[in-house]
Image: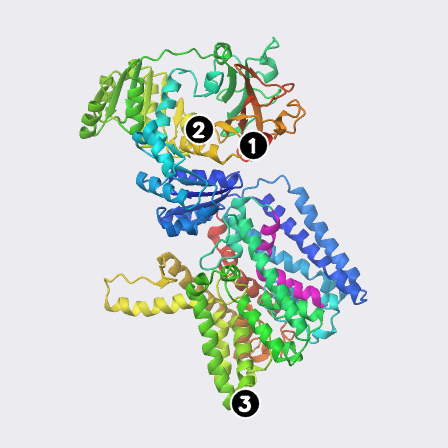
Amino acid sequence: MKSGMLNTRMVVNILGFLLIIEGLFMFLSIPVSLLYGEGDFVIFLLSGGITILIGGVSYFFSRNAEKNIYRREGYIIVSMGWILFSLFGTLPFILSGSIPSMAGAFFETMSGFTTTGATILDDIEALSHGMLFWRSITQWIGGMGIIVLSLAILPLLGIGGMQLFIAEVPGVTYDKLHPRIRGTAARLWLIYIIFTFAETVLLWIGGMDIFDAVCHSFTTMSTGGYSTKNASIAYWDSPFIQYVIIIFMIIAGTNFTISYFALHLRFDKVYRNEEFRYYLGFILLFTFIIGTGLIFSLNLKPEESFRVSLFQVVSILTTTGYVTYDYLSWISILGVLILFLMFFGGSAGSTSGGVKIMRVVVLIKNSALELKRLIHPNAVIPVRFNNQLLDTQLITNVLAFISFYLIIIVISMLGMSALGYDLDTSLGSVIACIGNIGPGIGGVGPMNNYNHIPDIGKWFLSLLMLIGRLELFTVLVLFSPEFWRK
Amino acid sequence: MKIVIAGAGAVGSHLAKMLSNENHDITVIENDRERLKNIGSSFDILTLEGNASSIGILREAKIKKADIFIAVTQSESVNVASSILAKELGAAKTIARIDNQEYLFPVNRELLIKKGIDYMIYPEMIAAKEIVGLLSHAGMSDVVDFSGGRLHLYAFRLEENAPIINKTLIDISDPDDVLEYRAVAITRNEKTIIPRGHDMFQEGDLVYVITNKGGVNNLLRYTGKENIEVRNIMILGGSRIGVRTAQDLGDQHYVKLIEIDREKSYRISNNIDNALVINGDGTNVDLLNQEGLSSMDAFIAVTGNSETNILSCLLARKMGVRKTIAEVENMDYIPLSENIGIDTIINKKLIAAGRIFRFTMSSDVTTIRCLTGTEAEVMEFVAKQDSPVTKGSLRDLDFPKNAIIGGVVRGNSSFIANGDTVIKPSDRVVVFSLPGSISTVGKFFN
């Protein structure tokens, strides 16, 4: 095969395999439907069947493909994989009529897989248990990533697997937990499953029924934020449940490598990680400020105001998007602080979205040092992170990321305002989607949803979610002429 | 198998790639960040930035659980030191690359083994040995001996006068019952296939044949090559390989060694008394002519520069030298150089990698060679009491399609394998395998 040509067959082959996996996940809703005596198990049987059939046919006819894939194939497979997952993921909603419009169903599914958690459903509780379960599953799969999942179970070619992993888990730097990518992927999923299970048990002890406990664990660990209730977590009005969810949101927003070391009792590695310390630092700082603000402005009791504050700070910082309190009803400065947090995101290598703490810290450090460089033009002033000097290339990459992020936000705001939305709603919807948060500000605040946005806006916001989930470059590179040049 | 490699230079990267393709867990330690980034993003391995002789780094590489530690950094002292440390920290087996023959003397070897270095490789010395071996079969591109010369693998390129061109394997099969040789692989347009009965030979093919002792003369008849008697040899480059080759060849041959550096030339001539050392630029055609290039039987270019080696070999060939050997360290140049007519390519990386590769096989492998003309490997296994390979005739075994059993050494006799052959325990078996099948082949001999 010539270089410069795309190995299309192999792309089709892997995409086919991914669809088979998705189909199998759809089947998971069947027992749920049967358990609750709902008739729509047929829908899941049908949806899963169609998905597996199409995936299987693609897989079968491309099985003789040359197994080598390079970066370009990696980017295409990952981007297309996520789009196809979302397309086929709409089948249960469409076939059952739960969400009749295509744009709406796609938005809802993409919002699921990208763990955004923005919904277009006016009445979530009207959905059957099977549908709610499927909705939660999309977030759970999307949280750790569909490629990481398939790498863990599919003995893909080592080199090819690497390319896919880099494209789906871009991060700032990537850590391997095991010499083989498959070993790393398997360990990541194992930790993920352990935490999900632990949270389910705790939520169940806290008074949720087992169905809600499972669904909320799925959407907490993936920092997704889909709830099975219209009122989100506020429905339970239980401090215990809120604290459990806070803890697991914090875990989900932590680099999974750190969790891996923590589970292996190697706390030196945890403590020495600079990003982790900043992450906890930001949580404490913002919780303290907002908590204090709430005591004075809303006259809440100290415990309650700090709990509300902690919950909301963690929920937004980790880009989960659960709500216990309408932050838009707070005094203006507290709302703006929440808006601040929407830019940050959780740690690199976690399931959260946003810019990521590490990038924010590198940006701040580099900017501060830039001032020093102005005074000492000839001095060598490198940026340090985790006690290591950072490559200039890495810093450039971080700066490019943040620039792209802001440019996309500004241009997209323009697009949303062209649809007739005010400044708040335009900014809120764009930042909540690209940051994979869910609730934004203005017309898409915590008490509203995205149903009122016209179809074209829904498609556009879906694209933003994908761009944000794959950390910009994996999707953006597909739009560059260089990528397609032979 | 868990393998830690120190050094991501040419040999280290090649090993990492090869071993990770064979499904081993590879960790590479290297202090050059650029190099690490290159291999870390293209192969499925774990990379670790740091000095291989640092205890902290070795611990981080989980050396305690490592089955093999391979030190192939540029620095011999780092290799030796880190191997000793690695052994001390729990590595099961250690291998160090050296560039000093002193360490290989039996007395010193014992000392180093006691200190924890299980095996040392000295690629330059092995390369020199290979060159010497090749010159006694100058018609061949490559020669590998098995079991002390009871079986051979020969590689030769088919030129237009070769009688077997356009014939199939069946056409040339021996009319008698006793097989003396068997073609195990053909490399054509940089792709290697394992030929079956109806595959045809073509001009320009690089053919790999296994023969037993008697088969060699018949083989030459088929290839249209005659055995060249090599007397006059010119070596270009006073590198370690060049000097060692001259030393080994000098007594039976007339050797001229050309070295560009004046100081070095003096030093070399001080060390070698059976070869003529000439101080001059090897790319200077006049100089080469003056020294009688056209009357040479073999030309060996082993300067540190692959391009110089290739070009000077081409020049020698044009002047009528019948056997040219070039050291080519850039892997991408190898097929290219072979296609434009250089007889044999020597590559230190492949030599070192082949030697080291042996240690990663769980089955009993006595020889393994990475061949330069192809990505494939040829190995000699010893069949064990209950190895799966002894469980029936070769035809009935589910042997991988990408590998072929060429010949068998049983006691003092050797024979070429065919479908009816049944391998017996303690037979030595020569297997030719394309990349990726090696572990499967290994299982047959477990």
Q: Pointer 3: what residue?
A: A298
Q: Pointer 1: what residue?
A: B442
Q: Give the range drawn in magenta.
A: A132-154
Compared with residue A196, is residue B5 higher up or lower down, i.e. above or below? Answer: above
| Relative horizontal placement of residue B11, taking residue A11 as reference (left or right) | left
Which sits in the foreground, A45 or B106?
B106
Which chain contains the residue that carries disc 2? B
Using the numbered discs, state the Cα–Cα distance from disc 3 to disc 2 in whole angstroms: 78 Å
Amino acid identity at mark 1 = Gly
Query: Quick check: can you spot residue B295?
Result: yes
Badge 1 element: helix
Q: Residue at x 77, y 57 (%)?
A: A45
Between disc 1 and disc 3, the foreground one is: 1
Amino acid identity at mark 2 = Thr
What secondary structure predominates along the stretch shown in magenta? helix
| Relative horizontal placement of residue A362, taking residue A139 as reference (left or right) | left
Circles 1 and 2: CB atoms closer than 8 Å: no
Residue B255: where, in percent of width, then height?
Answer: 27, 17
Amino acid identity at mark 3 = Leu
Using the numbered discs, state the Cα–Cα distance from disc 1 to disc 3 in whole angstroms: 73 Å
Which chain contains the residue that carries disc 1? B
Farthest residue to the top: give it.
B176
Q: Pointer 2: what residue?
A: B372
Q: Do marks 1 and 2 share a subunit?
A: yes
Callout 2 crowding tier (Cα within 10 Å): few <14, some 14–19, many ≥20? many
